[in-house]
Image (spheres, rainbow, N blue to C red):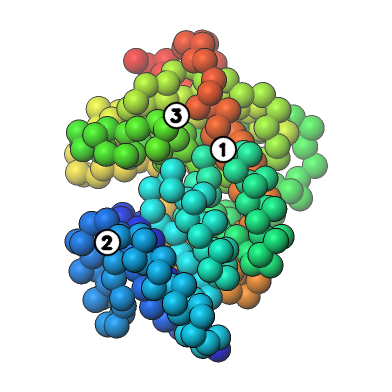
């Protein structure tokens, strides 16, 4: 049976991937909400969607559908709203008798996960999140290879992610620490989830530099030592990216060898949706380690550049 979906934050950057995933999995979008009315993207995927700019009216409409009959009610709420609203919108989904599929970060603080676990149990509905790198074929193969190794020494990992943003970024909610969680949460959390998934739990965490536009540090994981660097500053892009007019540089090396996963990104959200609809999605406990790490990075005191800092920090 096809499922009825509603979506929050449909005017945002990530929403089109969710709209495509809902459509590609053969389901129906019934209602959408966003304070902005620049949501013409809806017409690319669905032709009959009730749209609301006020959350209260959206809430009322979905509650009305819940009381009509089983076929009319919302089965899933996809959450693409700003990070600081994720917790509240997940709670809303559970309250109207729906499951939640929440874009990362699922929440900003570890204790929010504890509260959602209680609500999940009380409601009988499920909270899932988008950890799309875990379904990338190349990364699945890499994990299997790493887990099969017989190795005593830790791997040496270098993570570099630079995605240039204009002045608007720091003015928007994304540039507000209390709303986005900062760079480590807003642009880095899926990479931190990937590293923990590949190399095991965090044993030690250091932040070397933390500014609104760039941050970096060092992680000691169970099976790897990681130097990491995140930036939204165009000046941090390698020369070859600037020459090719590329705005993003994504680079991970393990023991000096590059991990190639630049292809295959377009369908990852759809694959996560497929797994979620089959009951094989990523839940609260899957999200917990990266939420905890991003929170700890946000709260840490930067100690400054040290000899083992990321090369981009040493070079500045």
- Number of the front mark, 3 or 1: 1
For the residues marked 3 and 1, what is the alpha-carbon distance in whole angstroms? 22 Å
Q: Name the residue under label 1.
A: 109
Other residues around mark 3 within 10 Å, as few (<14) / some (14–19) / many (≥20):
many
Residue occupying image coordinates x 30% and y 55%: 12
Image x and y of residue 212, in percent: 34, 25
- Write down the quadrant of residue 169 in the picture: top left
- Number of the front mark, 1 or 2: 2
The residue closer to the viewer here, 126 or 273, is 126
User: How many numbered marks, from 0 up?
Assistant: 3
Image x and y of residue 2, in percent: 51, 86
Q: Mark 3 points at which residue?
A: 229
Q: Mark 2 points at which residue?
A: 53
Q: In this view, does 171 lie to the left or right of 223?
A: left
For the residues marked 2 and 3, what is the alpha-carbon distance in whole angstroms? 37 Å
Image x and y of residue 4, in percent: 47, 79
* Residue at disc 2, secondary structure: loop
Q: Is residue 5 above or below residue 33?
A: below
> Could you tell which of marks 2 and 3 lies nearer the N-terminus?
2
Other residues around mark 2 within 10 Å, as few (<14) / some (14–19) / many (≥20):
some
* Residue at disc 1, secondary structure: loop
Residue occupying image coordinates x 32% and y 39%: 173
- Write down the quadrant of residue 27 in the picture: bottom left
For the residues marked 1 and 2, what is the alpha-carbon distance in whole angstroms? 27 Å
Whether tag 2 and tag 3 are in contact, CB under 8 A, the answer is no
Q: In this view, does 4 lie to the left or right of 95?
A: left
Q: In which quarter of the image is the C terminus?
A: top left
Image x and y of residue 259, in percent: 51, 45
């Amino acid at each position: 049976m096809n499922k009825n979906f509603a979506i929050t934050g449909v005017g945002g950057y990530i929403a089109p991937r969710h709209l495509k995933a809902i459509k590609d999995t053969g389901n129906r979008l019934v209602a959408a909400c966003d304070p902005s009315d620049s949501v013409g993207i809806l017409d690319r995927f669905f032709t009959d969607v009730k749209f609301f700019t006020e959350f209260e009216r959206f809430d009322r409409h979905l509650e009305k559908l819940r009381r009509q009959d089983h076929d009319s009610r919302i089965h899933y709420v996809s959450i693409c709203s700003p990070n600081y609203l994720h917790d509240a919108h997940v709670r809303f989904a559970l309250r109207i008798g729906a499951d939640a599929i929440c874009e990362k970060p699922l929440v900003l603080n570890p204790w929010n996960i504890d509260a959602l676990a209680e609500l999940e149990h009380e409601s009988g509905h499920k909270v899932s999140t988008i950890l799309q790198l875990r379904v990338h074929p190349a990364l699945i193969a890499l994990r299997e290879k790493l887990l099969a190794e017989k190795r005593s020494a830790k791997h040496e990992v270098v993570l570099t992610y630079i995605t240039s943003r204009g002045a608007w970024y720091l003015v928007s909610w994304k540039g507000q620490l209390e709303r986005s969680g900062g760079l480590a949460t807003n642009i880095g959390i899926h990479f931190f989830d990937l590293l923990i998934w590949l190399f095991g739990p965090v044993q030690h965490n250091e932040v070397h530099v933390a500014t609104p536009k760039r941050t970096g540090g060092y992680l000691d994981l169970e099976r790897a030592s990681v130097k990491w660097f995140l930036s939204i500053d165009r000046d941090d892009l390698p020369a070859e990216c600037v020459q090719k007019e590329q705005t993003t540089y994504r680079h991970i090396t393990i023991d000096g060898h590059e991990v190639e996963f630049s292809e295959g990104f377009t369908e990852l959200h759809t694959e996560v949706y497929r797994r979620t609809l089959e009951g094989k999605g990523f839940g609260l406990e899957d999200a917990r380690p990266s939420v905890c790490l991003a929170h700890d990075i946000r709260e840490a005191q930067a100690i400054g550049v040290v000899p083992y800092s990321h090369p981009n920090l040493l070079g500045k």
